[in-house]
Amino acid sequence: MSEKILIIGACGQIGSELTFKLRRIYGEENVIASDISYSNENIVNSGIFEIVDAQDYASVMVCVEKYKIDTIYLMAAMLSATGEKYPMKAWDLNMTSLFHVLNLARAKFIKKVFWPSSIAVYGSTTPKEYTPQYTIMEPSTVYGITKQVGERWCEYYYNKYDVDVRSIRYPGIISWKTLPGGGTTDYAVEIYHEAIKNKSYECFLKADTELPMMFMDDAIKATVDIMKAKASSIKIRSSYNLAAISFTPKEVADSIKKHIPDFNIEYKPDYRQEIANSWPKSINDSYARQDWKWKHKFLLDDITKEMLFQLDKKYNQTK
Ligand code: AKB
């Protein structure tokens, strides 16, 4: 019998693509998508979908019992930029949902948990270049604090209660199917939409702000791979550093100009600049590469080509 999976936060940027991928691997009937509202038609209409409030233990539990769930992917979270506007809401959502899922695993209702962490666990006192797995972590955003604390709890539940929880620290994720929402790295998705729609973009970060980034296909592969790996090869139970490429807004703009020569970018940094300044420029992910054989595929020009091709189809060829 196949593993039964519940994805909480399936309407979001990563949750939606993860749902499609897991359905291809495990079969449609074995992957239950859920979210707090019907905000993504593609997900709602593409298979089993349930309304689940990640902050309500009973709501999650009902779904776990109904479908006899083995594994939960907890993708619901408030990201860095929105978290700065609503600090207590970010804390409540990000922590309460994690405790509910960890406690379900502790009580043996489910067997396995995936919980995403982020490069936001790092702060301005962290070494910026090729940031190691084990280093100073003094996050300055509420989102980063929830991720760092969450990592400590994941490791605690693994050590004390034998909960099989696995996690990776996502960098900024670039994708064309579902828009991200409320993150500091969102510019790297918006820029492609605006390039296709208007040939111009006003960037909320400075031209030379270098951040770690990854194409969605690589991020989904990493998520599937860490969850498929043998438990004995997962040596880190807080969260793994994960990396692909790093680039600046100017470098994305230059990459876009290879396809759209008259693309224009202007820089108007806002409050998100300070968040970006506190994060690493690049990440050392050697533990992930060693323990569960992580390898990325997509470089900046590959990403640009695919993003522009897909978004051109979406905006121009469906008219
Ligand atoms: C954000 O910008 O908040 C997220 C992240 C790096 O975790 N994309």
Image (cartoon, rainbow, N blue to C red):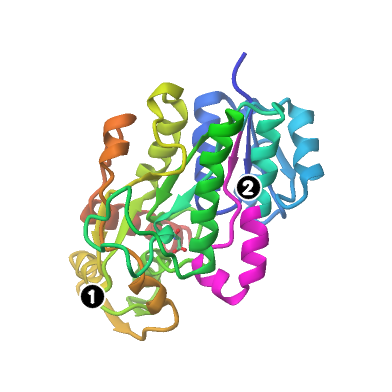
Identify whether 225 is placed above or below 319.
Answer: above
User: Alpha-carbon neighbours of circle 2 within 10 Å: few (<14), some, or many (≥20)?
Assistant: many
Q: Are marks 1 and 2 in contact (CB under 8 Å)?
A: no
* Quadrant in which residue 130 is drawn: bottom left
Residue at image x 79%, y 30%? 66
Horizontal side of residue 284 vs 220, given as left or right: left
- Residue 223 marker: none
Q: As rendered, which of 158 and 213 lies closer to the eye?
A: 158
Residue 13 drawn at (x, y percent): 51, 54
- Which SS class for mark 2? helix
Boundaries of the magenta span: 72-95
Q: As rendered, which of 205 and 259 lies closer to the eye?
A: 205
- Which SS class for mark 1? loop
Can the viewer see residue 33? no
Horizontal side of residue 251 vs 271, given as left or right: left
Q: Disc 2 residue type?
A: Leu
Residue at image x 59%, y 76%? 85
- Residue 208 marker: 1
Give the total of numbered labels.
Answer: 2
